[in-house]
Image: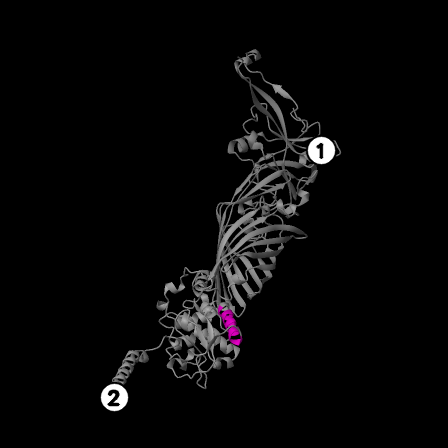
Amino acid sequence: MKTRKTWMACRSLALILSYAALFSPLAEASPARVGNGDDGADLEKLSKLESGPIMDARNRAVELVRKLNAAGVPGLGMLEPEISKSELFVASEDIPAHLEQDQGVFHSSMQGKVFARTLAEPHASTRFFPAAQRLESDQLVALHIHEALHRALPKAIREDEARVSALTLAITTPGATNDTVLASSQRWIPREVVPQTELQPASVGPGSIQGAVAQSASAQSAAVPIAASARVRQPSLFSYEYRRFQSTPDEGISALQVAGAHVLRSDLYPFGEGRSTLGIGLEGSLIQGADRTWMGPLGVSGRMQLWSGRGFDVGAWGLVTLNVLSAEELKNSALGRDATSIGLSMRKDLRFLTIENRVGYTLPGEATQKIGAVSYQHEFGAIVMASVSAAARIGNLRFGGFAELNLADEYRVTGGAFPFASGRYRLLSGGPRVSYETLDFVASVSGRLLLDATEGVNFDYLGNLLGQGAGQGAWMASVGVFF
Amino acid sequence: MLLKPGSGITRIAKRLSLLPLALAGCGLQEVVDSERVHPLDGVKLVRASVASPTDPSTIGRPEYLIDSDSRLLMRLESLQEHADEIRTDEGYSLKLVVTPIASSASGREEARARLQLCALARNWMMLATWKRGHPFDATGKWSTPGGDYDSEQCFSPELTEEGLLVFTVTPWFVMEVRGRGRNYGFVLMASAPVTIRGDGSSAQGPWLQWTQSSAIIYPRRR
């Protein structure tokens, strides 16, 4: 009997010892990674969040990130899907912030209670603790963004609390803009740690985090964001302009004594999206003569904002100026030609300077003028135009000027026994421009003066009243609204 | 013979070929002469007091006043097209005809004495003014206000029985139009005021008249 009991006790002891030997490695090893290297205590009594202040804060966080166009910032392409798609849980009890990873300002309260935890891996869930429920809405937004950054940032830096906190501040600070977020990312996210695969769309179905990442990545075609002040955001324009022409001393070739012009312009961009918009423009004019006013040329244009990025706005236009509605006096003159022009513009807005380059080409054209019993044919050669304008920016005020060179093929006049040919000629013009411009409104005063030209040539030779104008130049004043 | 415009090709004078007309069936041609009358289409009054090139008083008027500060630029714009057909050999001439407005024979005689037609030395167009022949570049400015003309190619008129003033401009035509290939037209000047019919006056505006040779080709009979 005694021997039997002894044997059973030894067997139990051996069993216990073997269990202890078996589980001791597990006891020493880290448990399943359910937190930032924690001991799993926060997994107890979790319930899934479906509504409430934390869910509302997540929606606000998503809106904020979209507004700042974080998807276009290198290294932050996955931030929005990580915020919006991560499963949210809430624990029933607070836990102390005893881990090293809990010491960040976004992770725990002054009382040492953890707000939330997540794994520094993509698509991990986020666990909130009761301490988080006492946070203000803005603080919850920052918390969502911070936790999502731990999952969304490149692997090499996503557990670097200093970098993650700096980026969180850059995104959530009042007055943040895409430019500030971009600047912060360039400082805290090294280019070399941003793998291309993180920005590549994944071939997965919709509804999943991978699908959201793919949608976000594919929707952003360039790594350069659209600046808040980019013209492509509000490209449509409605404006009025008055031009006062400087006539030539001995009448002009048009012999119409054109004194000025009232021009109404409407450019609407209903087509396209994002960086590229396509629109149609209309220009109507009233030409002011010495003692009367005539219906002037009608301009019809197609305009396109081709691209906006790195602070550049690139646009193209095609403009046809027609005299179908013009007064007979205008049609029966050298200014009665229909002109077709195409061009390209590139504009860069710096902090204190705006620079714009334009190149254009006007097709050859002709006009017929009958005086008495003789008909004269005015043949205008093709015109190449290149201009540079620059303006210093002081707030919304711009002070600057422009220079424009027009190179034209021969201008000919034939009629009866009279021939005239100008040969190829040039006109160099320039002038000042002062404007007040915001994203919504523009008012400007400018002048176009003939600086240099082939002998005897002036703007009448171009035959483009709505374009370069007439005579020796013009002074212009305009107001307009962008939308 | 002086013809009047407005009646079309009024008369045809035939000049027979050397061979009889019966031989026309052999495919010969016959040259015929015809009197041609062309109203001038390039008529522009330039006046020292008028600066506008399109002033209505200077174009298409039924009459024009010619005086020391008012001259009439005249030209048949299409004359060069007929240059090879116009006969200028002996007995044939090119005439420019104007109709003076005068109530009496003495008035018409006074007009004859006052008027002078001179060949212009610089081209011009219907936008001409007292200061410029045309508005394009420096070549359009008259060296002498009122028009640059060649004083050695000036013509005085003859007064016809019908009261017309005829300028025989054949030498100018031969030298300038046919010889140099240029048609700058004329400037009509007056030492004292003279009024003439203008191009706005039907059938009595200034005109050019000449004899033109034309060939009629008869096809060969089979």
Residue at position x 37%, y 78% from top? A37
How would you rate the neighbour count of disc 2 (Cα within 10 Å): few for under 14, some for 14-19, many for 20 or more? few
Is residue A387 in view?
Answer: no
User: Badge 2 is on which residue?
Assistant: A2
Residue A111 among those drawn in magenta: no
Residue B44: image x %, image y %?
64, 40
Overall secondary structure of the magenta section = helix
Q: Nearer the viewer, mark 2 or mark 1?
A: 2
Q: Please identify the quarter of the rendering in which residue A78 is found.
A: bottom left
Between A181 and A99, the one nearer to me in the picture: A99
User: Badge 1 is on which residue?
Assistant: B108
Between A19 and A279, the one nearer to me in the picture: A19
Figure check: A391 above or below A128: above
Between A185 and B222, the one nearer to me in the picture: A185
Q: Please identify the quarter of the rendering in which residue A244 is found.
A: bottom right
Q: Is label 2 in contact with label 1 (beta carbons under 8 Å)? A: no
Figure check: A167 above or below B189: below
- Image quarter (top left, top right, bottom left or bottom right) of the N terminus of chain B: top right
Mark number, residue A9: none
Task: Residue type at mark 2: give it.
Answer: Lys
Q: Which residues are magenta?
A: A52-65
Q: Are marks 2 and 1 on the same chain?
A: no
Q: Taking B170 as reference, is A225 left or right?
A: left
The kind of secondary structure element at disc 1 is helix
